[in-house]
Amino acid sequence: MARLRPSLRLFPLGLPRLALSRHTRFALLLILTAALIEVFLHTQRWAVRQPEHELDEPFYTSCQEPAIDQPREKAAMVMLVRNQELMKALKTVQSIEKHFNQWFHYPIVFLNDEPFSKEFISAMNATVSGEARFELVPKKEWLFPEWMDVADAKASIKAQGEAGILYAGLETYHHMCRFYSGKFYTLEALKDYAWYWRIEPDVEFYCSITYDPFVEMAKHDKVYGFTIALPEEPRTCPSLFRKMADYKELNNIPTTELWKATIAASWVPWPLRPFMGWFRHRDRSGDGWSLCHYWSNFEIANLDFFRGKDYQRLFEYLDKTGGFYYERWGDAAVHSLALHMLLPSHKVHHFEDFGYRHDWYYQCPANAPNGQLFESKLLPDGPYSPEREGGIGCRCECDGRRTRNFPAYCTNKLKEPNTARRLSMVESVRSWFP
Ligand SMILES: Nc1nc2c(ncn2[C@@H]2O[C@H](COP(=O)(O)OP(=O)(O)OP(=O)(O)O)[C@@H](O)[C@H]2O)c(=O)[nH]1
Ligand SMILES: [Mg+2]
């Protein structure tokens, strides 16, 4: 009869117990140890290099006297919007005018797949302090690509909707995501600009932005700026990461620190690890994508990067796979993965001094102590939140006691390549909670 040796209680009570010879036990222990070492070395391969000093800091950490006579960049704010969203769009424009554009007067380009109504045009013209431009997106940049079997794509969209995938049953949503992922950048209407600031209906800015972010982005050699980073809804893009990782491998694109930051290294040891590649959101070697991405309803970015050869080639490749319609790839995830593949990390900037809300998520810096520039005649008089130790905001109206209402995990993870200080264990655990 098999006798249980105390040292072999590998299984909980109730499961079959085995009597193993000393040699077998030794071999098992050896395999287990080798697997643990292999997994450790593997995860180290994906560990993000810690920079010696901060590679991305706020451009300013207190109010500035707006430099109204300083030369501007070739830049515009851009909003894709429908006529029926007028009231929400007005709210956004009033907010950005109050908190920024009343000093800098950048143009706002409104884009629509249908002609703008007279009402929309006159309401916006009455609200902006710079030029307002109203542009029609050409149908060929907006609708299904010509090579696509439209009936088949529509059937897939219907099925995605029935499966309850977020916004995936709306054909226009697919067009919008594809447009913002690639065609947006090569629009004739934007050809004179080097920079864009994406805005959306119904967003709010809470703090005064008293410097020119386009000028600072150019001065600091940045390409892309964000406010909020979140995990993507996994059911919208089951094959997106795999397609991206395949493209990277196929084109021998070296692994950047940002790419490492986006990877969730597999804990399954070799030789079992490649089998993990059968699952979604994993590359061929079995490593995964954290799903972390920058929320693209706010972006301040360089148009030349996105209309450049490297990004446009990648977009064309993604487009040809049909994933914008057969799945519901979002432009936010596409932008982020592309940036992580193609850019050194110091080219990405976190606008952590901006107070910003879209839907129910917000970022709200506390106001900078002794940094509110009381003597300024240009800054708004309205009430703003108290100054707080460590605050970097300028006259923010939101309550800076809570700097964000979503988990910091993705923000911390994606900022790791630019951050000299590593989080403590406690901070890491806390970053999983809002
Ligand atoms: N002209 C036009 N604009 C659109 C269309 N669909 C979406 N948009 C715009 O594209 C942007 C993103 O669309 P949203 O519906 O806000 O998508 P989202 O931000 O992912 O979703 P929410 O979290 O619900 O805001 C917004 O500026 C919309 O106004 C469309 O069919 N036509
Ligand atoms: Mg939106």
Image (cartoon, rainbow, N blue to C red):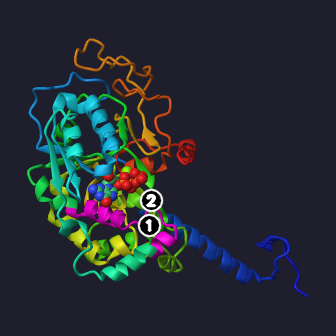
> What residue is at 76 percent from the left and 72 percent from the top?
10
Q: Quadrant of the N terminus?
A: bottom right
Decide if residue 231 is on the left or right side of residue 150. Answer: right
Q: Which mark is residue 410?
A: none
> What residue is at 42 percent from the left and 26 percent from the top?
390
Q: Position of residue 314 (x, y in %)?
A: 24, 69
Overall secondary structure of the magenta stretch?
Answer: helix
For label 2, being within 8 Å of ligand 1 is answered no
For the residue pair 404 and 275, the one nearer the viewer reads as 404
> What residue is at 38 percent from the left and 70 percent from the top?
240
Q: Which mark is residue 236?
A: 1
Circle 2 sits in a helix, a strand or a loop, which is it? loop
Q: Position of residue 224 (x, y in %)?
A: 26, 49
Confirm whether the magenta stretch covers residue 176: yes
Task: Name the residue type under label 1.
Answer: Thr
Q: Which mark is residue 232?
A: 2
Decide if residue 316 is on the left or right side of residue 287. Answer: left
The magenta span reads: 159-183
Q: Is residue 30 above or below residue 218?
A: below
Image marks 2 and 1: residues in contact by CB distance under 8 Å = yes
